Amino acid sequence: MTAIARQVVATGTDAAEVGSKIVEGLAGPDLRLAFVFADWRLDAAPLAATTYRGLKAPVLGGTTVGVIGKGVPRDAIAAVAIGLYGDWARIGIGVAQDLPKAALTRSRDAVNHAAAMLSTSVDALDPTRHVGVTLVDGTCGHKEAFCIGSAAAAPKIRFVGGASGTEPASERRALIWVNGEVMQDAGVVVLLESDRPFHAVTSSHVVPTEIKTVVTAASGQVIDELDGRPAGSRLRALVASLGETLDEPQPSHTFARYVDGVPYVRSIAQIEGERLHLACGVEVGHVLRLMRPGDLIGTTTRDLAIAADKVGGTMAALLAFSCSGRHWEARSRSLERALAGAYAAYPTVGFQSFGEQSGMLLVNHTLTGLAIGAERVGGDR
């Protein structure tokens, strides 16, 4: 059986050379789509141009604080790529640019454009054959609106995706690229029409507590007050009431908003005195549930095994968007090797994300992704 997906890991500091290695590993006449994810320290422009020119197929990707793939050397400057091959897949792509002007409208239009490339409409999309995959600029202040607008445009199908990343605690912008063009303040939607089984993965290991708190002062992604008290002191007291200790400045405890009984996790990226910096936006009046860290490795292993079973027992590819908060936690708990091993058990390519799309909402501390089965629906032919 001809491989329907191939993965490449390329290291080095010369972006054009890294791009050439990716082209050498992925080029083929039946290449339908390539994803390329790269360390933020690589120059995005030559990497994007080299891969698009050399592969002669749609190429999408973005920057990250860490790439995910089997054989990525520890602390190396690297890029990873995955190519999808053959007539089992049809691809529609839509780009939402200049999101600050009209994020909801432009993300909706991107989905409509992607559907038109498939010679169909959003109303005709079939959840058994179609799935949406998104990438968005992780330093754009409109990530949540992009998620809402894209998924709301095609409510019959599942959407998963990730936000690109960059150097932490800097003014440097995260980037995405589409067919050689490097962008910021933008998002891209891929509609995949597949006759292979697929499964949209969402995995979060954090565990809810009984403690709820109300945001009483906040701006953007910063909480200043909880329950009418300084946010840092209030959070420390809530964690202490559980008999637990709050890690600082990057805690492994998180918050979650519950929507229709489903938790949407909001990571606390940093504690700065009394201010809590979240990885997603928050508003005054939001009721947040305090979440404690659970079994990161066990939960990830279980959920990926379920995904493999859903696609017929064998994955041909796993496209993974894994929150950088999961990796910070893994480092703090000496679980980096175990987490890498959980991903390496499957043909995984992806990146550490600055937020993950799960349906209509942007979440944190979560693994989202797309598992693609090796066999055709109904058997190979």
Image (cartoon, rainbow, N blue to C red):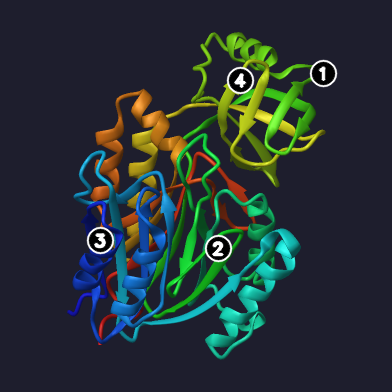
Give the quadrant of residue 357: bottom right
How far is disc 1 from disc 2 in space, using C-alphas? 36 Å
Nearer the observer: mark 3 or 4; the answer is 3
For label 2, the crowd category at 10 Å Cα-Cα, with few meaning under 14, some 14 to 19 and many 20 or more, is many
Q: Secondary structure at mark 4?
A: strand
Judging by the rendered image, the residue that carries numbered circle 2 is 159
Mark 2 or 4: in front is 4
Q: Which residue is mark 1?
A: 228
Foreground mark, 3 or 1? Answer: 3
Q: Nearer the viewer, residue 35 or 298?
A: 35
**Which mark sits nearer the N-terminus, 2 or 4?**
2
Amino acid type assigned to the residue bearing label 2 in the image? Phe
**Kind of residue at badge 1:** Gly
Amino acid on which disc 3 is placed: Val
- The spot of residue 323 in percent (x, y) is 46, 43
Are discs 3 and 1 less than 8 Å apart at CB?
Answer: no
- In this view of the protein, can residue 314 be seen by the observer? no
How far apart marks 3 and 4 lie (CA) works out to 38 Å
Query: Which residue is depicted at the point 26% across and 39% down?
Result: 75
Q: Which mark is residue 272?
A: 4
The three-letter code of the residue at mark 4 reads Glu
The Cα–Cα distance between marks 1 and 4, rounded to whole angstroms, is 18 Å
Residue contact between numbered discs 1 and 4, judged by CB atoms under 8 Å? no
Estimate the x, y position of residue 313 in percent, counting from the top left. 28, 61
Assign the C terminus to one quadrant of the image.
bottom left
Residue denoted by label 3: 18
Q: Badges 1 and 2: C-beta atoms under 8 Å apart?
A: no
The percent position of residue 31, horizontal first and vertical second, equals 30, 81
